[in-house]
Image: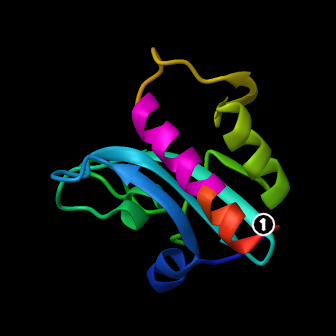
Amino acid sequence: MISHWTKDEFEEFTIAQADDEDYQESGYVAAVRDGVAYLSSYSHCSCYGTFDALCGGGISDWFDEEGDPQWDWTGSVDELVAMAKRCADPSMPEREATSGDCDYDHLQDVYNQILSWERNNGT
């Protein structure tokens, strides 16, 4: 597990992200670093970026001591690809996400990006 992320590293290792294109208040993001895969939902106001939101930045939040992203799910790249193929709920990977779930469309978009990344990069 990575002990620290910088904003530049977060951007470098992000492989998929989906949110509202005109206003990024909520969405999903996936990253792969050193063979470890990360997936999370996020929400933030317009004055915070995704990295800051995952580190606890928000109107009433404080950043954690390390300033690192707080991921909903962490595992292997193969596990992430398998989750994408079965459209798993990142908070409960054994459960399939449904159209009634919050930000379902963004999750589907991120999963499609992950599968495209996997086809192009191989795992």
Q: Nearer the viewer, residue 53 or 106?
A: 106
- The residue at 29%/49% (across/down) is 44
Give residue 32's position: percent from left, percent from top. Answer: 67, 69
**The C terminus: image quadrant:** bottom right
Q: Is residue 29 above or below residue 66?
A: above
Q: Amino acid at mark 1?
A: Val
Q: Is residue 5 left or right of residue 48?
A: right
Judging from the image, what secondary structure is the residue with disc 1 in?
strand
Q: Is residue 71 on the magenta stretch? A: no
Q: Residue at x 15, y 52 (%)?
A: 22
**In the displayed structure, does residue 123 sit left or right of residue 15?**
right
| In the depicted structure, whether residue 87 falls above or below residue 6 | above
Indicate the position of residue 13 as horizontal and vertical percent values: 58, 76
In the displayed structure, 102 sits above or below 35; it is: above
Residue 21 seen in render: yes
Give the x, y percent position of residue 73: 68, 47
Q: Nearer the viewer, residue 84 or 119?
A: 119
**Predominant SS along the magenta part:** helix
Residue under label 1, please give it. 36
Residue 65, visible in the rendered structure: no
Query: Given the current orientation, which residue lies at the most extreme top position?
Result: 100
State the extent of the magenta-drawn residues as a range.
104-115
Left or right of 91: which side holds 26? left
Other residues around mark 1 within 10 Å, as few (<14) / some (14–19) / many (≥20): some
Q: Residue at x 71, y 73 (%)?
A: 121
